[in-house]
Structure formats: structure tokens, C-alpha cells
Image (cartoon, helix red, strand yellow):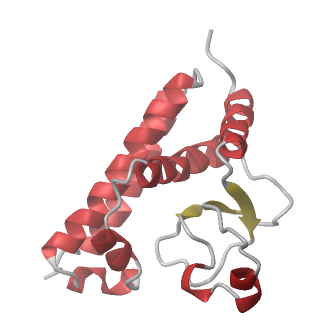
Amino acid sequence: MANTPSEVLNSLEQMIKNNNIELRYWAPIESNYLGEAGFFDPDPGGRNVSDFAREHGLQHRPGITLYRTHCKTPGPVLDELLTLAHEYGHYCSWRAKERSAEYETAIECDPCNWSQLSEASKQLIHGEEKRAWAYANETLRTLEFSDWPSFEKRESESMKIYCDKLWPKVSG
């Protein structure tokens, strides 16, 4: 029997906790060029780690951030579940060492300038997004998710946004 979206979300949140991934909730930001509902960061703080943290050997752990209208108020369960599953998919890709240094460099580029990236960099970004959705699919199947039409719609809409940023159509 399939689990409800709430049950799947709770199970996914537990998987995230068990993998020592920090889960954060932020209010939306104006500069979110892709209209994303969240993101994965393999090394929060990264190059900006404080001297205190370095001196005390504090470890950074991977993080997933979800945007909410208000940080403490969950959004619609299905929306949060699909976003979290996709971002967890990025974690799975990172853990499997499928994200190259070239990808990490390319993704740092302002999305408004993605069309100017090399074709190889565009393919890396596109491939990582597809891979994250594939891992999300696999994870949700494990958790007995059942609303596949909603999943497929979200995946399709997300990939279209990325494709439009990477390979904008010339109007004329």
C-alpha cells in the first residue's frame, strides 16, 4: 500500500537526518533566478569558513535548504516533498562522486549568464539536474510514493526552466 505524501515526507526527512545532512528553511529571496524552491550545498561555508571553525576543527556537513513563505510554516506537503526529494537527489549524486569539479565551477555562474557557458558546462549542469531527478524517483519509490503524475509534472517543469536558461530560444 502506498504511503501518503505526509508519511513519505516524514520518512525522507528521517533519511536526511540519518545521513547527517543539515536541513534548513529560508524565506524566499529576490535573486532566485530560477524560481527554485530549494537547493543542495555540499559544503556550506566552503571557502568562507571562519578562522574559529578552522582552528577548532569544526566540520561542515552537506546541507539542503528549502524556501518557505515563512521559515517556520511548511508549504503544501506535496510541493515540499518533491523539492526535498530532488535536492536529496543532488546529495545522492554528490555522495556517489558524480558531480565533477567542472560542474561545481559551472553552477557557480550566475544563471542569467548560463547561455554564455561552454557547451560542455551546459551539459554538466543539465546532466546533474536529470541525475538529481532520477535519484529523487528512486528514493520516492523506496518510500512508496504514489503520486507519479505530480512528480512527472514537477520534473518536466523544472527541466524546462533549466533548458530555457542554458539554451534560450532566439525570438524573431
Q: Residue at x 46, y 71 (%)?
A: 34
Q: Position of residue 19 (x, y in %)?
A: 64, 44
Between residue 95 and residue 13, name the one nearer to us.
95
Q: Is residue 113 above or below residue 124?
A: below
Considering every residue shown, the one lying at the far right of the view is: 72
Residue 99 in percent (x, y) is at: 35, 60
The picture places residue 98, in percent across and down from the top left corner, at 33, 53
Residue 23 in view here: yes
**Quadrant housing residue 119:** bottom left
Q: Is residue 145 left or right of residue 16?
A: left
The outermost residue toward the top is: 1
Q: Which quadrant of the figure has residue 5?
A: top right
Q: Quadrant of the C terminus?
A: bottom left
Residue drawn at x 68%, y 82% is 54
Residue at 48% across / 40% down in the picture? 136
Q: Residue at x 68, y 73 (%)?
A: 28
Total numbered badges shown on the rendered structure: 0
Q: Is residue 167 visible?
A: no
Say above or below: 156 vs 64: above
Picture quarter with the N terminus: top right
Out of 8 and 162, give the one closest to the viewer: 8
Using the image, determine if residue 11 lies above or below residue 30: above
Q: Nearer the viewer, residue 118 or 152?
A: 118
Q: Which residue is most to the bottom?
A: 51
52 vs 3, left or right, is right
Left or right: 37, with 169 as reference point: right
94 vs 72, nearest the viewer = 94
* Residue 153 image point, x, y percent: 43, 42
